Image: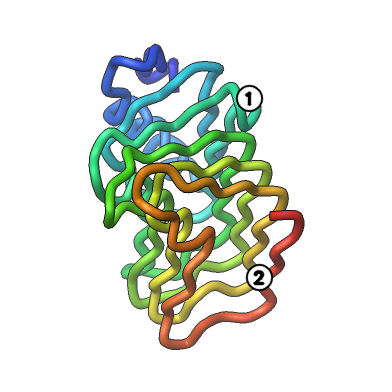
Amino acid sequence: VTDYGALCDGSTDDTTAIQAAIDAAAAVNGGVVVLPTGQCNATTVAISSNSIGIRGQGRYVSILYGTMNGNLITVDTTAADVYFFELRDLLIQGNDGAASKGLYVSGTNGFRRASIHDTYWAAFQVATHINSTFGADWFKYTNNFCAASGNALAGCVLMSSPNGGNAQTFIGN
């Protein structure tokens, strides 16, 4: 993200740079957006393409901080299924918003073969909310930690999709 102008200094709004890095990865049919050591501030970022990963340097040193009350990372499955999404090695922190979600998945298609590993979630109402019509298939959620701060954390993962999903794996959370 630093190649796209992110400072990740804890005070600058890095939303535009993070979104530009995600869009650049999507333009070449996928890639990994790397967050450096430090705090990257963002209002919200959107993903609707396959094979996008967001990876930090470690879950206590790379921080993605949501600066507003709402959804920090939104995955939209309206146009098509979204495959091979990954979050890894990050601290993802909200601002104690009563309706905030760290990762919100919505749309009319599926969220498939996604994985979230070694991620620390703090100060969200729900860390991960999957609300797409066809749910999540082959969703792995491993070695994550969810912490409440301010408003009570309602859950690490909320599946409210009409068709649920299958083969979810939750290990060491």
Q: Quadrant of residue 31?
A: top right
x, y percent for residue 146:
56, 49
The numbered dot on residue 57 is 1
The numbered dot on residue 138 is 2
x, y percent for residue 37:
55, 17
Q: Is residue 63 at all visible to an observer of this figure?
A: yes
Q: Residue at x 75, y 55 (%)?
A: 172
Q: Residue at x 66, y 72 (%)?
A: 168
Q: Residue at x 53, y 39 (%)?
A: 54
Front residue of 48/120: it is 120
Q: Amino acid at mark 1?
A: Gln
Q: Residue at x 49, y 28 (%)?
A: 63
Q: Amino acid at mark 2?
A: Trp
How many angstroms separate mark 2 from mark 1 (CA)? 25 Å
Q: Residues within 10 Å of mark 2 (few under 14, many from 20)?
A: some
Q: Quadrant of residue 129?
A: bottom left
Q: Residues within 10 Å of mark 1 (few under 14, many from 20)?
A: some
